[in-house]
Every structure is written in C-alpha cells, then in structure tokens.
Amino acid sequence: MRSASETRRRLARAVVLVGVALSTGRARADGTEPSYGRVAGDVTVVVGAGAVFDARGGRAEGEVRLRYLDSAGLFAAYEDAPVIGSSAPTARVLATGLELRPLFLFRWLRGQETHRAWMDLTLDSFGLELGATFQQPSGGTFGSQRGVAAGLGLEVPILPDATGPWIGIHGGLRWSEEALASGDVNSSGARTAYVAITLAWHQVVIAHVVDVGDEAPR
C-alpha cells in the first residue's frame, strides 16, 4: 500500500508540473511568463537586513527565510543593537516561525494574474506569520524571556522578477510567556506591537524538495 508521505510527494509533484505547463502555455499566448520566475525552482531563499521598531524604539535586524514554491516556509530574524534613540529594556530578540503566503498558487493556477509584474508579485507576497520569540532583557541572559508572535507581511520587488532585491514590511503583535500563562493577553503591558522594514535578496533555487528535478520548459 502506498504510504501517506509518498502520496503527498506525488500530489506536490503533480501540482508543480501542471502549474508549469499552464504557465508556459499562457506565456506563449501573450508573451508574459506569469510566475515571473517563481517556478524556475522549488525553493526561494531570502536573506535580508533592516530595522524593527516597537513602542520603546528600534533595533537592527537580520533575517533568513526559506519558502517552498514561494508559498509556505520558515523564517528566523535576529534583532540587536538599539537604533534611533531607543530606551528599550530588551537588548536582543530571536524570532522564528512559520510563514504562509496563500495567494500565489491560488491566483497563478487559476490564471488570475494582472500581467503587471510589480502588482502581481506584491499582491502575492501577502503573508501570515506565526512563531516564537526569545528575548534578552537589558542585564539579563539571552532567551530568558520567551513569548509568541503573530503578524502579517508584504514585500515589494525592486525588479520585475522573483529573483532580485525586495523591500519588505512585516508587523504584528508579540505576547510574553507570562501573559499567556496568566491569560492576560489583551492589556497593553501584555503585548507589544512591532514593525520591521527590510531590504532583502530573493533567490529562486532548485532544491528537489519533491524530486521534480525539472525547470520550467523553455
């Protein structure tokens, strides 16, 4: 009997190959490749830097993201070194979690692109983020304060292609472990709003995650 993992792999492979075929057909019809390079590989690697701001000030930030078919993946962001006159009692933060970008495959496989690269890429970049935070308060040890975070993200390409430089805006709320334990998650002291602005490089690569092993037909 075929295992569940093998079934999932076959289904993922079928989605990719059908999508590539549809994309190629539409490209020949109107001269536009509507994935803008997002199916030239199966994984998008993102490396960026910028700053994150909350009510107490800001910190420099670096981030790494890995996305499968530019639709779902993992992220890690590290914040350090106060910027712009911060009085923040938090010296360092490590945030990690999951990212889901639901619009790309839905719109692309249904042929709902506008064929305006910047508009399609920006719209499809809308993402949901959920993860954990590990903070170091001033004078404390790293990770001594833990919590969870939920947020949204949007990215704008500088070039009309999936591979290249992008400007990202990510924001949301963070709750401390103590607030979650007490059930007090709605008071202003229990949560912290944040906004991060980054400049990142996106690189689409072939990682053979589902053993597709084929680039989009030329």
Image (cartoon, rainbow, N blue to C red):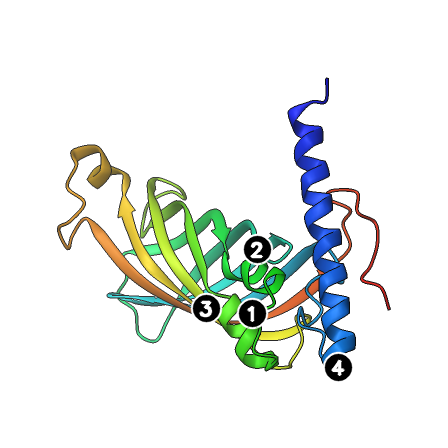
3 or 2: tag closer to the N-terminus: 2
C-alpha span from label 3 to label 2 = 13 Å
Q: Residue at x 15, y 49 (%)?
A: 186
C-alpha span from label 4 to label 3 = 27 Å
Q: What element does badge 3 sit on?
A: strand
Q: Give the number of the disc on residue 31.
A: 4
**Foreground pick, 85 / 149:** 149
1 vs 3, front mark = 1
Using the rendered view, name the quadrant where residue 33 is placed.
bottom right
Cβ atoms at labels 4 and 2 below 8 Å apart: no
C-alpha span from label 2 to label 1 = 16 Å
Q: Amino acid at mark 4?
A: Gly
4 or 1: tag closer to the N-terminus: 4
Q: Residue at x 67, y 29 (%)?
A: 5
The percent position of residue 195, horizontal first and vertical second, equals 35, 66
Cβ atoms at labels 2 and 1 below 8 Å apart: no
Seen in the picture, residue 8 relative to 86 is either above or below; the reply is above
Crowd around label 2: few <14 · some 14–19 · many ≥20 (10 Å): many
- In the image: residue 141, left or right of residue 72: left
Using the rendered view, name the quadrant where residue 169 is placed.
bottom left
Please give the residue where the numbered disc 1 appears in the rendered image: 112
Please give the residue where the numbered disc 2 appears in the rendered image: 71
Q: Give the number of the disc on residue 154.
A: 3
The percent position of residue 74, horizontal first and vertical second, equals 55, 48
**Foreground pick, 4 / 205:** 4
Q: Residue at x 17, y 37 (%)?
A: 183
4 or 3: tag closer to the N-terminus: 4
Crowd around label 4: few <14 · some 14–19 · many ≥20 (10 Å): few
Q: Amino acid at mark 1?
A: Gln
Specify the quadrant that holds the C terminus.
bottom right
2 or 1: tag closer to the N-terminus: 2
